[in-house]
Amino acid sequence: MRAVQIGAGNIGRGFLGQLFYESGCFTTFIDADPELVRLLNERGEYPVEVVDPLSTIRVSNFRAVEAGTEQAVRAIAEADIAATAVGANVLPKIVPMLLAGLAGREAPLDLILAENLHESAARMREWFSLTPTPLPRKTEGHLGLVEASIGRMVPATTE
């Protein structure tokens, strides 16, 4: 299985990335920070510290690409599942990239919206409808927008 995680911050890596890894998915992290993308690719793994019970999970089996690139669009087109954790203010900015990826898809896609945004699925559908490039017709009825509420404490990371 191939997963796409848009937003490689605390929730993207520390929660969703870990869940995709533990589910056996190869994950592509898409992020706007080129330095983070470089470091993730260079290191090839990262730790997730779990407090209860105390343990460290070493997440691997991923790659990272910069948002808005052809690599990001292709990853969305080829994903079996995808998720966002970019923040409510950034969410509308990723719509063009999502639409480009969806245009290249043949199979249905579930997109988990792990955002602190009331009615995020309805907002996404509205943002899709407001773009010059509409949601591809073949995608209508084949795109699941899943609103998620994250129930995990993720403290700010340090070096």
Image (tube, rainbow, N blue to C red):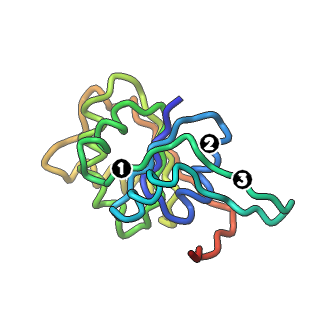
* Residue depth check, mark 3 versus mark 2: number of the one nearer the observer: 3
> Badge 3 local density, few (<14 within 10 Å), some, or many (20+)?
some
> Badge 1 local density, few (<14 within 10 Å), some, or many (20+)?
many
List x then y, in percent, for residue 120.
Answer: 45, 57
Q: Earlier in the sequence, mark 3 or mark 2?
A: 2
- Quadrant of the image occupied by residue 109: top left
| Circle 2 SS class | helix
Asked if disc 3 and disc 1 are in contact, CB closer than 8 Å, the reply is no
Q: Earlier in the sequence, mark 2 or mark 1?
A: 2
Looking at the image, residue 99 lies above or below residue 67: above
Residue 124: image tag: none
> Which residue matches tag 3?
57
32 or 34: nearer the viewer: 34
| Circle 1 SS class | strand
Asked if disc 2 and disc 1 are in contact, CB closer than 8 Å, the reply is no
List x then y, in percent, for residue 94.
Answer: 30, 55
Q: Seen in the image, is 25 located left or right of residue 35?
A: right
Asked if disc 3 and disc 2 are in contact, CB closer than 8 Å, the reply is yes
Residue 21: image tag: 2
- Quadrant of the image occupied by residue 107: top left
The alpha-carbon separation of the residues under discs 2 and 1 comes to 17 Å
Q: Residue at x 49, y 38 (%)?
A: 3
> Which residue matches tag 1?
65
Q: Residue at x 48, y 65 (%)?
A: 117
| Circle 3 SS class | strand
6 or 87: nearer the viewer: 6
- Quadrant of the image occupied by residue 76: top left
Amino acid on which the number 1 mark rests in the picture: Val
134 or 41: nearer the viewer: 41
Q: Which residue is farthest front?
A: 42
Looking at the image, residue 42 lies above or below residue 110: below
Amino acid on which the number 3 mark rests in the picture: Ile
